[in-house]
Image (cartoon, grey):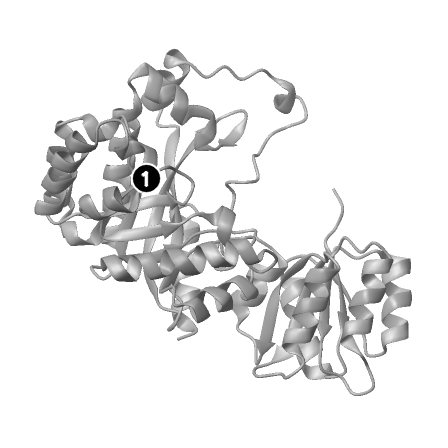
Amino acid sequence: MRTSTLLILDDDIQEANLIASEAKSLGFEVRIVADATLFIDAFLAWKPTHLAIDIVMPGINSIEVLKTLAQLDCQSSIILSSGIGTDTLPAVQLAAIEHNLNIRGILYQPFHQHILRNLLNDQVSVDLHAHTSSDASTQSFIVDSDTIADAIHNHQFTVFYQPQIELFSGKVIGFEGLLRWKHPVLGIKLPELFIPVAEKTGQIDQLTQIVIESGFSFIRSLGTALSFSLNISAKSIKNQMLADSLVNACKSFKLAPEKVILELTETATMHDPDEAQHILSQLRAEGFKLSIDDFGTGYSSMAQLAKLPFTELKIDKSFVTTMETSSKSRKVVASTLKLAESLGLETIAEGVENTLAAIGLRELGCRYAQGYYFARPMDQAATKTWLAQWNNQF
């Protein structure tokens, strides 16, 4: 496995050394140059995995540096370093987008440690790093009712947590709970692999109960101010015992229902809108909040959206990740935000992967967001560590 390497272009030796020190603590090999020509020469000779470029340096045209990197087919992850309010930032951003460079984000000076760590390395997230051996990775993996039942019995299902941030203040307002299968041999498995099977086998309610009990317990251990979002399957929403299970869990873990947000996809309410309205109204009467997930990817009409008692609209990541390069995506996001405002719904965007997306959403009026830019989904221990570090910044 190749060692992570970072090449820094910065004439401020103090700032460069701070970035270098943080990178080295994450296991990076680091080199620093203050001259654009030497920077390009070092890039060609070293082929670093990451680049950090100060976009405001005397005598150096940062746009030309980016163009040169594009011509050299640069595949490195690039961090742009900038003072807040830099006049040249929009032009540099545009140049980076036009040349399809892999921009991880913008590091504003003076920088925050947690942001630099997220830009450099996503080590706190193990959900995308299945701990497999070369032999294990080639083994066939059959997902059926028996293997799911065995995994439930052996406590292999666990909940990961991704923070949700208020864009205007940077405050953590809650976490979304995401189920993972921690296979003892094949490592972490994502829900796309087992949720559809569990819905067919009727085991989805058991998995939902794992998220409820584990998530409620953990989020309550962090205090009383944070909310907890969890996904509810279209199959589970028809289960009349769902409300009882949620209410009982709130009482057991002393978690206010108002702090629980149930996320449903558009299609979950399409099969039987009248039944959905009845069940969702019951859940709202108990105090639970309701979020329509992946909005824009289904077929719900505005009339249906207004009819059902949703409190939140979640903008799908497919629009968020492309809104800076696609005018159509940006228009979809803008119109969705206006629709939500007209219906009195809170808005949260998922899939925020860089500073450009976060700034763009804030400018359009989106209040909350989540995504890799802030943190990937984490287990309980990593979540506690991340939260403490994030709160220290404020």
- Residue 30 lies left or right of residue 159; in this view the side is right
**In the picture shown, does residue 124 fall above or below 279?**
below
- According to the image, label 1 marks what residue? 300
316 or 79: nearer the eye?
316
- Residue 208 lies left or right of residue 102; in this view the side is left
The answer to whether residue 286 shows anywhere in this view is no
Indicate the position of residue 41 as horizontal and vertical percent values: 91, 66
Q: Residue furthest top?
A: 146
Task: Assign the N terminus to one quadrant of the image.
Answer: top right
Q: Amino acid at mark 1?
A: Ser
- Residue 324 lies left or right of residue 263; in this view the side is right
Residue at horizontal 22 percent and vertical 31 percent from the top: 237
Residue at horizontal 15 percent and vertical 49 percent from the top: 257
Specify the quadrant of the image occupied by residue 70. bottom right
328 or 82: nearer the eye?
328
Indicate the position of residue 135 as horizontal and vertical percent values: 66, 21
Count of all numbered marks drawn on residues in the image: 1
**In the picture shown, does residue 77 fall above or below 261?**
below
**In the picture shown, does residue 308 fall above or below 153?**
below
Q: Residue furthest bottom?
A: 58
Task: Assign the C terminus to one quadrant of the image.
Answer: bottom left
244 or 68: nearer the eye?
68
User: For the residue labelled by badge 1, is the local secondary structure a helix, a strand or a loop?
Assistant: loop
Specify the quadrant of the image occupied by residue 13. bottom right
Other-residue count near label 1 (Cα within 10 Å), few / some / many at <14 / 14–19 / ≥20: some
Indicate the position of residue 333 as horizontal and vertical percent values: 44, 57
Residue at horizontal 27 percent and vertical 50 percent from the top: 228
Indicate the position of residue 392 as horizontal and vertical percent values: 41, 72
Residue at horizontal 32 percent and vertical 57 percent from the top: 339
Specify the quadrant of the image occupied by residue 25. bottom right
The answer to whether residue 166 shows anywhere in this view is yes
